[in-house]
Amino acid sequence: MDAAIQIHSLSKTFGNGRKALQKIDLSIAPSEMVALIGASGSGKSTLLRHMAGLITGDSSGAGSIVIHGRVVQSNGKISSNIRSVRSGVGFVFQQFNLVGRLPVITNVLAGTLHKVPMWRSLIRWFTPEEKAKGMEALRRVGIAECPGQRASTLSGGQQQRAAIARAMVQGAKVVLADEPIASLDRG
């Protein structure tokens, strides 16, 4: 069985010479759930950002990341088709990355933007089916009561739930989550 995520010899050195990752090798099978545990500053978020193709590894090494058979990066260069690869990778950020002035449902439906025509994304027009998926995701994370509320007015836990709902509607094959439950309450 092919790995869902395959990382080979990935290293990352920051401009100040600090090594965040050193020759990381990792293979994660489809449907496998993995938790990265380590001290603050040990490179967990850095590794996740590499896996999403948001930052590159050292160009001097032979590091590579492949997700579901598609190259994310290799030898310190992001794949030329990274946008297509990212459409299959959901990311729940530690800082939520919601647009505060937009309604919660619009933030959630941003997870579908890779599937909709540009003109629809510009005017924020979503089909009834897309809206229904967004509402179902909000129901599943326990905040179905606030789809029209501005994201900036939500509590930290509610914002985290909205970010999780956004990843759910994306329909990604791989979900990366950076401290996904750190802000959640018991609700």
Image (spheres, rainbow, N blue to C red):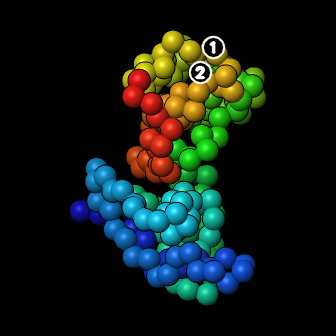
- Residue 104 sits in which quadrant? top right
Q: Position of residue 53 (x, y in %)?
A: 58, 60
For numbered disc 2, what is the local secondary structure? helix
Between 87 and 185, the one nearer to me in the picture: 185
Amino acid type shown at disc 2: Ile
For numbered disc 1, what is the local secondary structure? loop
Q: Tell me which residue sits at (43%, 71%) in the image.
A: 7
Between 19 and 167, the one nearer to me in the picture: 19
- Residue 160 visible: yes
In the rendered image, the vertical position of residue 149 relative to residue 44, given as above or below: above
For the N terminus, the quadrant is bottom left
Residue bearing the label numbered 2: 105
Q: Tell me which residue sits at (56%, 47%) in the image.
A: 94
Residue bearing the label numbered 1: 148
- Residue 171 sits in which quadrant? top left
Q: Position of residue 25 (x, y in %)?
A: 39, 76
Q: Tell me which residue sits at (62%, 59%) in the image.
A: 54
Q: Residues within 10 Å of mark 1 (few under 14, many from 20)?
A: few
Q: Earlier in the sequence, mark 1 or mark 2?
A: 2
For the C terminus, the quadrant is top left
Amino acid type shown at disc 1: Gly
In the rendered image, the vertical position of residue 92 relative to residue 137, given as above or below: below
